[in-house]
Amino acid sequence: MHVKKFGGSSVADAEKIRQTVAIIRQSSSEPVSVVLSAMKGVTNYLVDAAEMASRGDQNYKKNIEAIKEKHLNCLDELFGAKKPEGLQEGIENLLLDLSEILHGVELVRECSLKSMDLIMSFGERLNCRQVAAYMNTIDVPSVYIDSREIVKTDSTHGKGNVNFERTYREIQSRIKKDGSVTPVICGFIASDDTGRTTTLGRNGSDYTASIIGAALDADRVEIWTDVDGVLTADPRVVPNAFVIPQLSIQEAMELSFFGAEVIHPYTLVPTTDKDIPVYIKNTLNPSAEGTVITKHYTKKERAITGIASIDDLCLINIEGGGMMGMPGMASQIFSSLADAGVNIIMITQASSEHSISILCRREEVDRAKDKLKESLKPAIESRKIQNIEVVKELIIIAVIGENMIGQVGLTGKLFSAIGEANVNILAIAQGSSERNISFVIEQKDKEKALNAVHKKFIG
Ligand code: ADP
Ligand code: ASP
Ligand code: MG
C-alpha cells in the first residue's frame, strides 16, 4: 500500500488535478490510498468568510461565490458536457449548506471554534468529491471517503487530538487493501465522539496521510507538494535554498516544528511508530528525486542540515533581583501560562536567575502578560520581580542538523556570522540533543539573518 497526499497547490485547478491523477495512475502496480487537501486558497476563503460573517460584514457572500465559481469552473473543465449524474447537484448542495451555516454565523454574530471547524471542512469535502468522480470517469475506480467517519479526535476544536486506537480500527475496517478501488480521502478533517466535525489544525492533511499510512501499515507515505522536497531553508526567503535528499526523523521534526511548513509537525509521529518512510515530492516535477525521511541517517558533509523560522512572536522578560534562589518561580510562571492556554515556544533563564524570558505567539502575548501579572502579584508587590516587559515583532530562527552534535566552536561561528550581518540577537537556546540551536531576532532582520547563515554554513 502506498499513501499519496496532494496539497492545495497540487489540486489548484483542473489542469493540476489532471497532473495529480496522472501521478496516482502511474503507480497502479501497488494499491494506493489518496489523501487530498482543499483546492488552493479555499480554506483561507472559508476562514475569512466566517470571520466576516461574525462581524456582520456581507462580503462573506463574495467568498462563497468565489468558492462556487472555482469548483464549477473546475467541473466544466474536467468533465465538459459529460458530468456524472448528481455530481454538480451534490457540489451545489454542499455550497447551499455552507451558505446556511454562514448565515447562521452572521445572525448570531459569533463564530466559535466548533463552527469554524465545520466551515473549514467544506474545502476538503468539495474537492475530494470532484476528484473521486473524475477518477471514475477515466477508469480509475475510486471512492470518496469523508474522513469524519474514520479519523476520530477528542473535542478540542481547531486542533483535535487523535484517538489512535479507534481511528486505526475505523480506517482498517473501511479501506480495502486489495487495490480494487482507490479511496480518495479528505485530509485535515475528523470528528469527535459525538460526531461533531473537528480538524487536525491548519496544514493538517499531511498528518491525515501519515495516520492513514500507519493504520494500513503502508510501505511508504508520499507528500506531493509544489517544491522539489524539503529544502535547506524556506525558498521564498532564501533563494539559494536547495533540496535535502535525505533527512533523519529528528531533523525533519525539528524543521517542521520551527516553521518549515512543507510538512505538518505531527506528520512523522504515526509513521515513525510503524517505521514507514515518508517522501516529499513535487507534483509539478514528478521525476525529481525529492526528499526521503527515514530512521536511517546518512551523514552529510556540512554541519548544518537546514534552517527554519517562525514569524510573529513576542518575548516576555520577567526580571527581578529577588528571583534569585527562589525555588518554584519557573514552575509558577509555566503553570500560570498553561492555565491561560499560552503555548511557550522557547524559554531562557540566565544562570544568575535574574531574569526569565519566554517566547510566545503575538496573538497570545496580551493574555500571557495579564495572567503573569495576576499570578505573580505577591512577588511584584514585594519587589522580588521588578519588571515584566514585552518585546514585539520578533522571530525565532532554528539551525538544525544531526552533524551539529559534538561540534566544538559551531555556536561561536554561527553567532559571529549573525554579528557580521549586523543583526542583534535577543535570546538564545540550545536543546541538550545539540541538534538544534535557536535564537530570537527582530522580524525586520529575518531575510538578512537567514541568508547570512545559509551562505556561510550551507552554501
Ligand atoms: P501544500 O499545499 O502542498 O500542503 P504547503 O504550502 O503547505 O504545501 O507547503 C509547501 C510550501 O512550504 C512551499 O511552497 C514552500 O514555500 C514552503 N516552505 C517553507 N519552508 C520550506 C522548506 N524548508 N522546504 C520546502 N518548502 C518550504
Ligand atoms: N486545507 C487545510 C489548510 O489549508 C489543510 C491542508 O491543506 O493541509 O490548512
Ligand atoms: Mg501543507
Image: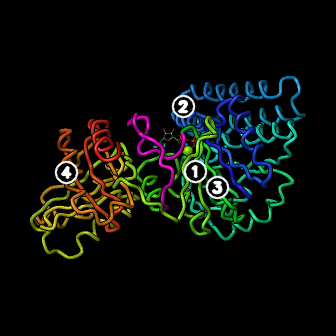
The answer to if 241 sits in the magenta stretch is yes
Residue at the disc numbered 4? 389
Residue 12, by quadrant, is top right
Q: Residues within 10 Å of mark 4 (few under 14, many from 20)?
A: few
**Looking at the picture, does residue 158 appear above or below residue 101?**
below
Residues in magenta, as a range: 228-249
Q: Can residue 104 be seen in this view?
A: no
Front residue (pair 45, 268): 268
The answer to if 303 sits in the magenta stretch is no
Q: Which mark is residue 101?
A: none
Front residue (pair 247, 446): 247
Mark closest to the chain's N terminus, 1 or 3:
1
- Give the CA separation, mark 4 to mark 2: 36 Å
Front residue (pair 298, 32): 298
Q: Residue 221 carries which label?
A: 3
Mark closest to the chain's N terminus, 2 or 1:
2
Q: How many dots with numbers?
A: 4
Mark closest to the chain's N terminus, 4 or 2:
2
Callout in the foreground (2, 1):
1
Three-letter code for the amino acid on which mark 3 is drawn: Val
Three-letter code for the amino acid on which mark 1 is drawn: Gly
Mark closest to the chain's N terminus, 4 or 3:
3
- Give the CA separation, mark 2 to mark 3: 43 Å
Dot 1 beta carbon under 8 Å from ligand 2: yes
Callout in the foreground (2, 3):
3
Residue at the disc numbered 2? 56
Residue at the disc numbered 1? 204
Q: Are marks 2 and 3 in contact (CB under 8 Å)?
A: no
